[in-house]
């Protein structure tokens, strides 16, 4: 049980969801009705965006209140099917009181490519985000979606959803939203830098340790493990991050090889 959590009241939470919705929309982090935002306002109460509305044009009366099982407590609209992800974050980590999901273009490009942000390239990247892993691909609206992000909710600040978009969370809605802004800003900067040079150099282990200390002094204990320059050198110049989607591919390849070998062996036996 986490002490000292101050929840927003219902009106404050609804106002903040609409405000963050406008920011997410105006920043081009979503298209049409994409994305969703939620704020936890009690041990078992969450305000969330409904399905089928643009996040840029919401009013407080459109929002829905649910419990942690997803049962609607207040509001006339239907919650988004992606709300399952938000509820899973709250169930996995009691410290979290806000979750933001969007499809910002640069971060989503990394998600599409299955490339995690796991190298220490900038102080902001280390302090504000830490490592951002890629979750396993999950079919929209299914139980696979919350299951795919569950392993990351305690130790990380954000996750890239394979072939889909990004999810960030925080101890309040501003922290959750700023993590989305930082994630997109950092992803975009990396994309631009990679166009200029393929000689990106990670921060040294010493510099990385210094930044992690600063991060801890700010009260942030989460962020996972980032790869320093020394580790990158050990991994080799041609190291490509071994992301979750390539693990999936490897497993599929192994299964098909096993199936072929089994068939060959059976043919000989017959
Ligand atoms: Zn989405």
Image (cartoon, rainbow, N blue to C red):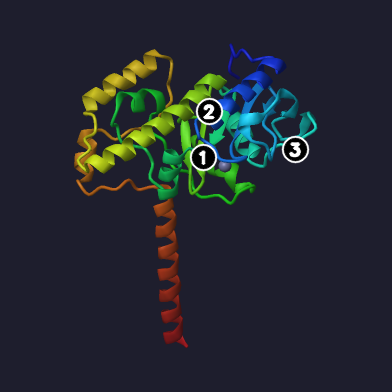
Image quarter where ligand 1 lies = top right
Q: Secondary structure at mark 2?
A: strand
Q: Which residue is mark 1?
A: 103
Is 152 displayed left or right of 45 in the figure?
left
Mark 3 vs 2, N-terminal side: 3
Q: Position of residue 202 (x, y in %)?
A: 24, 33
x 65%, y 37%: residue: 83
Task: Give the distance between the C-alpha atoms of the residues marked 1 and 3, in whole angstroms.
Answer: 21 Å
Task: Give the distance between the C-alpha atoms of the residues marked 3 and 2, in whole angstroms.
Answer: 22 Å
Task: Say which of 72 and 4 sits in front.
Answer: 72
Task: Say which of 92 and 102 sits in front.
Answer: 102
Q: Position of residue 6 (x, y in %)?
A: 61, 12
Q: Residues within 10 Å of mark 3 (few under 14, many from 20)?
A: some
Asked if the residue at tag 2 contacts the one at tag 3, i.e. Cβ–Cβ closer than 8 Å, the answer is no
Q: Quadrant of the N terminus?
A: top right
Q: Secondary structure at mark 3?
A: loop
Q: Which residue is mark 2?
A: 169
Q: Residues within 10 Å of mark 1 (few under 14, many from 20)?
A: many
Q: Position of residue 102 (x, y in %)?
A: 54, 36
State whether label 3 is within 8 Å of ligand 1: no
Mark 2 vs 1, N-terminal side: 1
Q: Which residue is mark 3?
A: 78
Inspect this view and state whether residue 153 appears.
no
x 23%, y 29%: residue: 203
Q: Position of residue 121 (x, y in %)?
A: 28, 31
Task: Give the distance between the C-alpha atoms of the residues marked 2 and 1, in whole angstroms.
Answer: 15 Å
Residue 84 lies in quadrant: top right
x 31%, y 38%: residue: 192
Tally of marks: 3
State whether label 1 is within 8 Å of ligand 1: yes
Which numbered tag is attached to residue 256? none
Residue 30 lies in quadrant: top right
């Amino acid at each position: 049980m986490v002490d000292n959590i101050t929840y927003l009241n219902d009106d404050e939470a609804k106002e903040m969801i609409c405000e963050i919705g406008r920011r997410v929309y105006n920043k081009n982090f979503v298209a049409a009705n994409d994305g969703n935002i939620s704020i936890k306002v009690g041990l078992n109460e969450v305000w969330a965006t409904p399905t089928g509305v643009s996040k840029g044009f919401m009013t407080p009366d459109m929002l829905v209140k649910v419990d942690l099982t997803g049962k609607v407590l207040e509001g006339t609209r239907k919650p988004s099917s992606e709300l399952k992800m938000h509820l899973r974050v709250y169930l996995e980590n009691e410290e979290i009181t806000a979750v933001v999901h969007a499809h910002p273009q640069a971060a989503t490009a990394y998600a599409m490519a299955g490339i995690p942000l796991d190298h220490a390239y900038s102080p902001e990247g280390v302090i504000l985000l830490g490592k951002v892993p890629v979750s396993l691909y999950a079919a929209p609206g299914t139980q696979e979606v919350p299951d795919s992000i569950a392993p990351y909710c305690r130790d990380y600040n954000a996750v890239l959803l394979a072939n889909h978009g990004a999810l960030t969370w925080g101890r309040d809605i501003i922290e959750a939203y700023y993590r989305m802004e930082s994630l997109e800003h950092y992803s975009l900067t990396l994309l631009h830098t990679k166009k200029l040079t393929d000689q990106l150099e990670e921060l040294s282990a010493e510099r990385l340790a210094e930044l992690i200390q600063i991060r801890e002094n700010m009260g942030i204990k989460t962020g996972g493990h980032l790869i320093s320059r020394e580790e990158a050198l050990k991994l080799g110049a041609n190291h490509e991050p071994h992301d979750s989607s390539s693990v999936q591919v490897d497993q599929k390849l192994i299964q098909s090889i096993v199936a072929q070998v089994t068939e060959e062996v059976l043919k000989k036996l017959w």
